[in-house]
Image (cartoon, grey):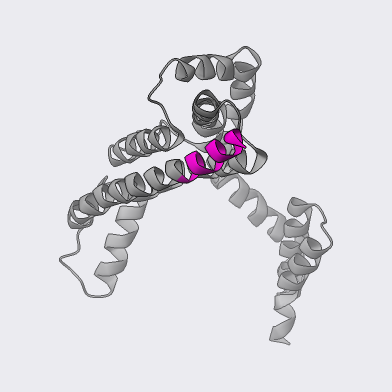
Amino acid sequence: MEILKLIGVVIVIVGFAIKLDTIATVVIAGIATGLVAGIPLDEILTILGDKFLSNRLATMFVLTLPVIGLLERYGLKDKAVDFISKIKAATVGRIALLYQAIRVLSAAFSLRIGGHPQFVRPLINPMAQAAAISQYGHIDEKSEDEIKGIVASAENAGNFFGQNVFMAASGTLLIASTLEEQGFAEATALEVAKWSIPIAVISVLVAAIYYTYFDKKLNGRLLNGKKA
């Protein structure tokens, strides 16, 4: 009857498939799994409560959302657009590259100055969109979506490749401890961080090539459309 303990997996799959409330589905799946495993209901609820309290800091980013909303309401996007429209040399690719380089550098020093809700949506994306509009006079829906993807990827890549340069980052420590468990005693956190530096630099160089290509692709599409 051990297979009955997988009832939680079935509940999650069914709940997601019929689009039930995500949190309710997961909680019900946890309770069902605990009951099938023979755990008393009060103990299950205690476990759920303890896990929620111990991981509550993971949801702290939610507090930034109303703040960003207020800033947007009172002109944050408009000011970003006004600023970038005055820089004639600005392109989508150059803005994305600059932001990715900043994210790599900040992540290398464990400075959390970026993020999709905090920076990309209210600042970087409007600046990139404004650069395209300033350059071409218009952008179509496809180009607008691609620009959103480009600036979002700059955030992801910058954070991903930069964070392991910081010796005390959780990812660096996890890599070092995992390698140590596998018998690579020389793979200390310092060594992992040191060898992450060239990877971070290469990621920016590759991004520069890709963003240059993206600018050329955007230029060909929108200029041709403008001429037509």
Q: Is residue 99 above or below residue 26?
A: above
Q: Position of residue 29 (x, y in %)?
A: 75, 64
Q: Residue 165: percent from the left, percent from the top?
A: 26, 47
Query: Quick check: is 224 in the magenta stretch?
Result: yes
Q: Residue furthest front?
A: 228
Q: Where in the figure is residue 59, as x and y percent of width and height?
A: 58, 40
**Residue at horizontal 60 percent and vertical 21 percent from the top:** 67
Q: Residue at x 18, y 68 (%)?
A: 185
The reply to whether residue 78 is in sight is yes
Q: Residue at x 20, y 71 (%)?
A: 184
From the image, which quarter does the C terminus lie in? top right
Between 217 and 202, the residue placed more toward the observer is 217
Residue 116 placement, left or right of 46: left
Q: Quadrant of residue 144?
A: top right
Which segment is the magenta one?
217-228
Determine which quarter of the picture holds residue 86. Answer: top left
In this view of the protein, which residue sits in the foreground, 48 or 93?
Answer: 93
Front-most of residues 190 and 228 = 228
| Residue 164 in view, yes or no | no
**Is 43 positioned to the left or the right of 197 in the image?**
right
Who is closer to the viewer here, 182 or 85?
Answer: 85
Q: What kind of secondary structure does the magenta stretch mostly adopt?
A: helix
Quarter of the picture containing the N terminus is bottom right
